[in-house]
Amino acid sequence: APAAGASEEDEKRAKALAKREKAKQRKAAAKLAKADAAPAATAAADDKGGGASNKKGANAAEKKPEDDDPNGEKLAAKPPLEEALRLSRALDKYAASFVATQALAVDVALRRKKPLVALRALRRLKKLDERAFVEKLALLAAARPRWTEAAKPVENVLDAELADLCGGQSAAAACRAFGMKRTRLPDRAACYRALATLGAADASLVLTAETAPPAFGKPLAVTDFEDALAALSGDAAAAERFKAEVARPKFPTADAFAPPGASA
């Protein structure tokens, strides 16, 4: 009797297992059938309504507003300073952390004769990029003598802020100190431009700049040398010397550094 009981229990378990296995198989088959039917349903939907949807998208693309000023004539007719101010404010609102944004803000403020606004942008620029800061600092310092008509409190703030930004020394000394500290060619070119703005240009800063590839980081590009050459454009002798001694050995086939009279 016990043996028969055991056999009966085993049979029940076998039937239950078989039932579960059949259920799994049915479920898997239904899932597979659903997966196979999905592409067909999508294709049918495309045939039915997708064409209209695509047509609608194409029509939307076709109905893009036309450029009512393709040659920029309307833009050119706008007051340049007002347009520059509008763009500067928009950039300051949405892209204040970009170097170009604060550099533009300084330029626009200087042209609007707003020294305190220029100072604010210059402070921000110093935190973002010291090279750009040095060039704009020179512009602000060079413009200072023209603002004698400003209210006395404004003059006092301007002088105090400039002294602080320059570390208690003259603007020219501050710019030169930057060039002594940062000897790579792009930094020296910026230093030269700053000093030239202040009437203290020194071509030796560019001619003796470091141009060797750094231990870590990217080597200087040809555009860095072109930028330095452009900075020296007001000094023909220094520019030719830079081409011959600094740039041409690095880029012997570059037209920008070809000797005078050389054919392109």
Image (spheres, rainbow, N blue to C red):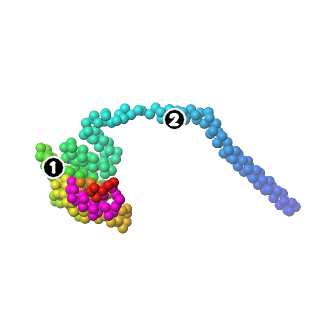
Q: Residue furthest right?
A: 1
- What residue do we see at 21% from left, 56% from top? 236
The residue nearer to you, when weighing 181 against 11, is 181
Q: Which residue is mark 2?
A: 57
**What span is in magenta?**
234-258
Q: Is residue 116 above or below residue 257?
A: above
Mark toward the start of the polypeptide (1 vs 2): 2
Q: How far from the left and from the top, in percent, is residue 205?
A: 23, 62
Quadrant of the drawing holding the N terminus:
bottom right
Which residue has dot 1 on it? 144
Label 1 and label 2: CA atoms lie apart by 57 Å
Q: Quadrant of residue 229?
A: bottom left
- Residue drawn at (58%, 35%), measured in percent from left and top? 50
**Where in the figure is residue 53, as x and y percent of width and height?**
55, 34
Secondary structure type for disc 2:
helix
Q: Give the amino acid type for the residue marked by disc 1 in the picture.
A: Arg
User: Of helix, strand and loop, which mostly describes the magenta segment?
Assistant: helix
